[in-house]
Amino acid sequence: MLSVFDGRYRDLTNFTSSEYLHINSCGVSYMRFADKPRTTRFYRPDGRVDYHFLLITDGSLSALVDGEEYVLSVGDALFYRSGDTQSYTVTVDEAQPFEKHIYVHFCGSVADEVLQKAGLVNSCVIFSAPSDTRRIFEAVLRSHRAGEEITACGNLLKLVSLLSPNVTRAQSDTVKLIFAEAEYISLHYKDEIDLNECAVRCGLSRSRFSHLFTETVGTSPLQFQQKLRMEQACELLKFTGLTVGEISESVGLSDALYFSRLFKKYTGVSPSVYRKK
């Protein structure tokens, strides 16, 4: 028995975002058919407008990538770029739920640049993904489900690093440390960040750390923090009744006038105009 998930009609999270990074959806695909074996085909002939990582956690999956058929097993990963045809099938042949794969769909203003630097320039199959891949996937899921989007995006950056073909064994430890610092900043974006301390944790000089951070993440550490602050301010303006001064304080900026200047530089409008819109 074959069923088809046709993304042209059933994808509800297929959109782009102007945020730095944005997770459109993520989760675990479970399948359970008690009566007979059943195959489900996931089909998106026009792809999606966002990007798609998928990790096989049980059984196997057959995927079409760039016109070639691949059979993926536990520990293999799959990456689809925006606009690329997606076609993959899974089969359940026992009367128990099977966790077949973990997935995440994401987009953002720097997503393409980060993926380019990671060497993920084409849709691809990643055989025998690094051992930490599942743990990082699950960290993305947990933080996203908890509404901790900044943490979720920090974990997503780690995932990109893990699956990057550009990260050689010699580079891997340093790149992991850089992404760990990106996660640290995302968790402490309200606080003053001491770049000297960040550099020491990575075993680098401050200038080398800043250079590698910008090269790896796509923006400088302080710009990264500022963008996180402004994104949080946007959410607070949209969904709370806090004053501009209170929002300024809540994102770690004690000077409301300075906050307003930064906000206008980031969004093009003042906080009060943004709230009205």
Image (cartoon, grey):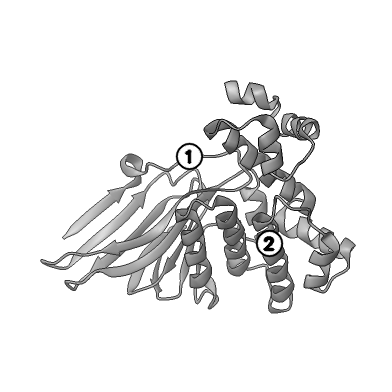
Type of amino acid at the residue the image marks with label 2: Tyr
Residue 189 in the image, given as x and y percentages of width and height: 70, 52
Q: Quadrant of the N terminus?
A: bottom left
Numbered mark located on residue 204 in the image:
none
Nearest to the observer: residue 189 or residue 68: 189
Residue 44 in the image, given as x and y percentages of width and height: 37, 48
Q: Residue at x 74, y 53 (%)?
A: 191
Q: Is residue 132 left or right of residue 70?
A: right
Numbered mark located on residue 184 in the image:
2
Nearest to the observer: residue 127 or residue 51: 51
Residue named by callout 1: 15
Residue 80 in the image, given as x and y percentages of width and height: 49, 55
Question: 111 above or below 205?
Answer: above
Of the image marks 1 and 2, the number of the one nearer the N terminus:
1
Question: 221 above or below 129?
Answer: above
Badge 1: residue crowd in 10 Å (few <14, some 14–19, many ≥20): few
Badge 2: residue crowd in 10 Å (few <14, some 14–19, many ≥20): some
Q: Residue at x 78, y 71 (%)?
A: 201
Q: Is residue 247 left or right of residue 133?
A: right
Q: Residue at x 72, y 33 (%)?
A: 263
Nearest to the observer: residue 43 or residue 113: 113
Type of amino acid at the residue the image marks with label 1: Phe
**Which-is-in-front pick, marks 1 and 2?**
2
Corner quadrant of residue 261 = top right
| Element under disc 1 | loop
Q: Residue at x 75, y 30 (%)?
A: 260
Q: Are marks 1 and 2 in contact (CB under 8 Å)?
A: no
Q: Quadrant of the C terminus?
A: top right
Nearest to the observer: residue 104 or residue 247: 247
Q: Is residue 116 left or right of residue 144?
A: right
Corner quadrant of residue 13 = top left
| Element under disc 2 | helix
